[in-house]
Image (cartoon, rainbow, N blue to C red):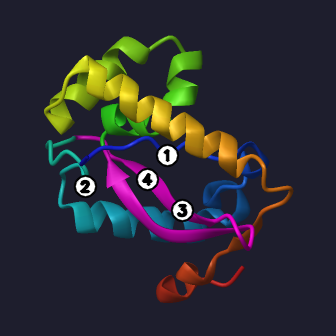
Amino acid sequence: MKLEFEIVPDGCWYSNLRSALKKSDWDKIRFDAYKRAEGKCMICGAPAKRLEAHERWSYDERLGIQKLEDVIAVCHDCHCVIHIGRTQLMGDEDRAISHFMKVNNCSYADYRKALGEANMVHRRRNLVPEWATDLSWLARMKIKV
């Protein structure tokens, strides 16, 4: 699927770059993502007047490492799908469902299946007692933490 859910393990909530970095460093990262996007969402390809910076993380469950892989620019609708748990809490799931199905050219059943699989991964990752954070990606931006 082109657009997927990225449900963050509970132990990693609130550990994001924007809050961990100086504003000038965060701005450097997000503006780089916006520049690479060339005015289009890096997931669905839709032109967007306002893009949002999204942190892409990988999770090594065996070693308990949350690793920053990239920061990309996405439209608001894709960002709402990616963070579906928050979107559900905000009461905007219907719009996210429609966007997920449109971008992935799939059915509601496909949406429910993908969400179920994402929730299973989330539950499994929540079994990791503590996550370490790998921010080595920041070296490419010449940012030290």
Relative vertical location of residue 118 with respect to residue 111 in this rendering, above or below = below
Q: Nearer the viewer, mark 4 or mark 3?
A: 3
Q: Whole-Å distance between the Cαs marked 3 and 2?
A: 16 Å
State the quadrant of the C terminus: bottom right
Q: Position of residue 71 (x, y in %)?
A: 44, 64
- Few, some or many residues within 10 Å of mark 2 (<14, 14–19, 20+): some
Q: Mark 4 belongs to which amino acid?
A: Ala
Q: Which one is closest to the eye, mark 1 or mark 4?
A: 1
- Work out whether residue 96 or residue 32 is closer to the camera in this orientation and state it: 96
Q: Nearer the viewer, residue 8 or 126?
A: 126
Q: Is residue 113 left or right of residue 102?
A: right
Residue 23 vertical position relative to residue 114 in the rendered view, above or below: below
Answer left or right for 51 relative to 122.
left
**Mark 4 Cα within 10 Å, few/some/many (few <14, many 20+)?**
many
The Cα–Cα distance between marks 4 and 2, rounded to whole angstroms, is 10 Å
Kind of residue indicated by mark 1 = Glu
Q: Name the image quarter holding residue 78.
A: top left
Label 2 sits on residue: 42
Tell me the distance, in whole angstroms, between the alpha carbons under discs 1 and 4.
14 Å
Asked if the residues shown at circle 1 and circle 3 are in contact, with their CB atoms under 8 angstroms apart, the answer is yes
- Is 56 magenta? The answer is yes
- Which mark sits nearer the N-terminus, 1 or 3? 1
User: Which residue corresponds to the image point at 62% horizontal and 56% vertical from the top-left?
Assistant: 18
Which residue position is annotated with label 1? 6
Q: Which residue is mark 4?
A: 53
Amino acid of disc 3:
Trp
Disc 4/disc 3 C-alpha distance (Å) = 13 Å
State the residue in front, 61 or 96: 61
Which is more N-terminal, label 2 or label 4?
Answer: 2
Residue 57, which numbered label? 3
Q: Provide residue 127's location: percent of width, then percent of height.
A: 78, 49
